[in-house]
Amino acid sequence: MSEILATTARVLRSPRGLVEEADDPRVLGRIVPHLLLVTTVGAAVFGAVVGSYRGGEQTLYAALKMPLLYGIPLLVGLPAARALFEAFGAEVRWSRLAVAGLAGTARAAVLAAALGPALWLVYSLAPGYHLAVLLMVLLLGVAGAPGLLTVAEAVPAGRARWLGGLAALAVLGLVTAQTGWLLRPFVARPNAEVTLFRPVEGDVFGSLLRVPLASVDVYLEYEPQRKRVLGGR
């Protein structure tokens, strides 16, 4: 337990130190499980707070899915991030980038858990559904930004580091946003059926565009135009 707490402290205070230790295989085998555990616990705590908006089974569902929201983008986006760094001329080893990704993810999860009480307090005031979703997204962004910067810091300093870093951060941010959309709901509607996942429809960007309008009872409906492929009336 003391090692887990020590890892958590290092994730918050000096994540770059963890990245530097990625060069030692013996240290690598010890810190990776710790980082995964810290990420899982921190994300689950934040997920439980998010699910408390609806309560009941949704609290458990959100707690189970939130660690996936942090883990899946890492698996999908990290190879693309490395390719982008290399495209801008910044060489980075896989072990170093992987530990940077894990440390950044753990940092984001711990910060999200720390922001959980504030979100729970707001949810206890029974805000509207759309406002509750926007608050969750805002806190995920606030907590995730320092974690994403940890990934950029894994690359040696220089112009290529920042150019590749910005491109890599954009990719990881987009993958995270779409992953959250696929894993929804986290904040369940008050009158909707409680379910682990919702059917895939649209994408996160169109949904976030509609949420602010829906919060003031303005709804955008899209009716696709149907045309005959082979002509005719």
Image (cartoon, helix red, strand yellow):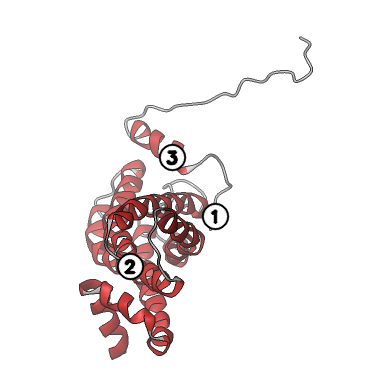
Q: Quadrant of residue 227?
A: top right
Q: Amino acid at mark 3?
A: Phe
Q: Amino acid type of disc 1?
A: Phe
> Mark 1 packing: few (<14 Cα in 10 Å), some, or many (20+)?
some
Q: Nearer the viewer, mark 2 or mark 1?
A: 2
Reply above or below: 98 against 210. below
Q: Residues within 10 Å of mark 3 (few under 14, many from 20)?
A: few
SS category of the residue bearing label 2:
loop
Q: Residues within 10 Å of mark 2 (few under 14, many from 20)?
A: many
Return the residue found at the far front. Answer: 89
Q: Position of residue 89 (x, y in %)?
A: 39, 57
Number of dots carrying numbers: 3
| Label 3: element kind | helix
Nearer-N-terminus badge (2/3): 2
Q: Which residue lies at the image location 52% right of the left edge and 50% below the top edge?
A: 193
For badge 2, the amino acid type reads: Ala
Query: CB atoms at circles 2 and 1 under 8 Å apart?
Result: no
**Nearer the observer, 232 or 201:** 232
On residue 154, which mark appears?
A: 2
* Residue at the image point whose x is 39% and y is 35% from the top: 209
- Left or right: 40 with respect to 134? right
Q: Nearer the viewer, mark 2 or mark 3?
A: 2
Task: In this rendered view, identify the residue nearer to me: 28 or 197.
Answer: 28
- The residue beneath circle 3 is 205
